[in-house]
Image (tube, rainbow, N blue to C red):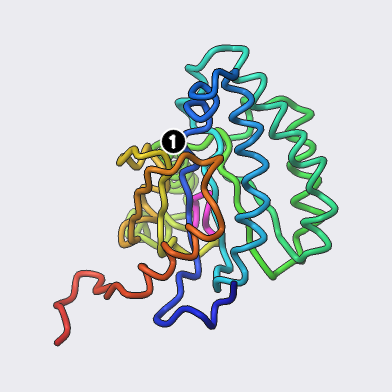
Amino acid sequence: MAAKDITGTMPSHVAIIMDGNGRWATARGWPRLVGHRRGAERVRSIVEAAPGLGIRYLTLYAFSTENWKRSTEEVIGLMTIFARYIQSEAERLSTEGVRLRFIGGRDRLDKKLQKLMAGIEERTKDNDRLHLTVAINYGGRDELMRAARQIAEDVAAGKLTPAEVDEVALEARLDTHDLPDPDLVIRTSGETRISNYLLWQSAYAEYEFTDTLWPDFSAEELEAIVARFCGRERRYGGALTA
């Protein structure tokens, strides 16, 4: 699989809502956490495939601010899976030139998990082959609220005037301030919602919704979606060209 096999403008930044782990497991009579573990394993193949498709930025929705409503057992299990993923993948990501970062509020996460997250961010900070971002305890509305609060504090402190509050000022305070906006957003599992994901950043993103459950989502399907993206004309509010 190689980027040269696909014509058209490649999506530099792809964001994915990884949905369907629980249903994948339930359909097989297994506990939901088995599906989450399989979903974490699926991340590896997608991360490996991304650079060959011309993708330089890959952002994955792992745990939303709303996911705390799930059972205590499932939440604890998910946090354990996140920690194990960081520990098991740290060396591989580092040697393969992948920079790993996290977005979302960290204050509610376990201190040990926060330490693991900070450690792998530091370890991979100079990598540039693929920028992998994982959204944990992330919600688009929460992100915008935190950015708005920071702007209000800066105005109150005299660091910023009301006239200086513009798109640039807001974007500088988002979790994704050092990332380009996504070109393509993919959601697996057949759902057609955006689920509070990258609300500001995805204003002009192309969307793809697939019935495939995340544990079954393959590098080949990603390639097919990228190929369809390359056939689209992105006008950003402009008129259709002849």
Give the magenta range: 172-177
Which residue occupies 58% across, 37% down?
136
Above or below, 107 against 29 in this view is: below
Which residue is farthest top? 72
Left or right side of 61 for 130: right
Tell which of 126 and 207 is nearer to you.
Answer: 207
Residue 93 x, y percent position in the rendering? 77, 56
Q: What is the secondary structure assignment of the residue under circle 1?
A: helix
Residue at 50% across, 70% down: 12
Q: Name the residue under label 1.
A: 142
Amino acid type shown at disc 1: Asp
Residue for point 27% across, 75% down: 233
Q: Does the magenta-highlighted stretch encompass residue 83?
A: no
Is residue 24 shown above or below 162?
above
The front one of 26 and 151 is: 26
On the rendered structure, is 218 left or right of 121? left
Q: In this rendering, would 162 be left or right of 70?
A: left
Measured as percent of width and height from the top left, residue 209 is found at 35, 49
Residue that protrudes farthest toward the bottom in the picture: 242
* Residue 82 in which image quadrant: top right
Q: In this rendering, is residue 154 above or below 141?
A: below
Whether the magenta-drawn stretch holds residue 174 is answered as yes
Tell me the crowding category of disc 1: few under 14, some 14 to 19, or many 20 or more residues within 10 angstroms, Cα based. some
**Vertical position of residue 165 compared to residue 235: above or below:** above
Image coordinates for residue 48, horizontal then vertical, percent: 67, 60
**Residue 180: image x %, image y %?**
49, 65
* Position of residue 220 in the picture relative to residue 84 (left or right): left
Main structural element of the magenta stretch: helix, strand or loop?
Answer: loop
Q: Which of 148 and 235 is in front in this view?
A: 235
Furthest residue in direction front, as rendered: 28
Q: Quadrant of the N terminus?
A: bottom right
